Amino acid sequence: MGKYLLKRLAQVPIVLMVLITTTFFMMRLAPGGPFSSDKKMDEVIKLQLEKKYGLNDPMHIQFGKFLLGLPDLGPSFKNKTKTVNEILAEKFPTSAYLGFLATMFALCLGLTAGIVAGVRQNSGFDYGSMAAAMLGLSLPVFVVGPVLALIFGLYLKILPAAGYNGWTDWKGLILPTITLGLPFAARIARLTRAGMLEVINQDYIRTAWAKGLSEKVIVLRHALRGAMLPVVSFLGPGIAAMLTGSIVVEKVFAIPGLGMEFVESAFNRDYTLAMGTVILYGVLLIGFNFVVDVLYGFLDPRIRYS
């Protein structure tokens, strides 16, 4: 197991370095720049700004300075009052909190529906839950969000249609949590059902039935462990995506998270802010995938000893 973990851990800095390098040069090679705009800027002022931020240096020099400056990501080109680190520290907790709630919602709903559908194959609940899961996968969040806001916020008036007033504003987070978590819950339900169907007919499960063990013990203690493999594989990138926030969900429900900052930084060619959000997302994605690899080793002995 130790060799397996070391092998996975050694890949982390390599993957992160490839991500940083690729993103840096793609952004620099894209047309336009942080000081290009529809409004004509005096060429002297533009040259002075580029000199101030080091944009007139050769690209490999800029890249070297960027790497040497890490983890300080430098100033934002568009937000003059805050550095990139300050913007990330301010915006990320909101997106992470929403992503955490959406993850818990997706796991609770998806695992429950998938386990019951797998154990009760070809039942009414199986057909109904999988049809609902397919609907959840088919409907994009930019449709689900406004519909929920329209029904529960404007017609029924039992939940806020938009707005966010801090971590204790649980009512304001219900609709965004459901909107963000539904597609992931649908995928988890389908993966859990498929895993249960594959495991439930294995010889060791038949042996457990023959021993007279209760259905609850067989499903939760024996079958679920093997059925969770495809779900765990999905959770790595899935949780990272939810924790970094959804651009559409944050826009629909007016949540001041990191998603909108990333979009605006891309449109504004705010190199440092865009790099900061990409690096943050990359670290989360790599970290959660590493955790998934570790969990795989515990769930499947064949991987653990390979």
Image: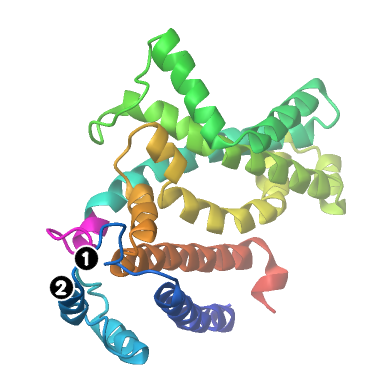
Specify few, some or many for label 2: CA neighbours under 10 Å numbering under 14, 14-19, or 20 or more. few
Question: Which residue is located at x 38 percent, y 69 percent?
Answer: 32
User: In the rendering, at what x and y percent does residue 74 appear?
Assistant: 21, 72
Q: Which residue is mark 1?
A: 41
Q: Amino acid at mark 2?
A: Ile
The relative height of residue 306 versus residue 83 in the rendered view (above or below) is below
Specify few, some or many for label 1: CA neighbours under 10 Å numbering under 14, 14-19, or 20 or more. few
- Residue furthest to the left in view is 81
Question: Which residue is located at x 48 percent, y 14 percent?
Answer: 151
Q: Amino acid at mark 1?
A: Met
At numbered mark 1, what does the secondary structure look like: helix, strand or loop?
loop
Q: Is residue 70 left or right of residue 236?
A: left
Q: How many marks?
A: 2
Residue bounds of the magenta highlight? 78-89
Q: Is residue 285 magenta?
A: no
Q: Nearer the viewer, residue 255 or 130?
A: 255
Q: CA distance from mark 2 to mark 1?
A: 7 Å
Quadrant that contains the C terminus: bottom right
Q: Which mark is residue 270?
A: none
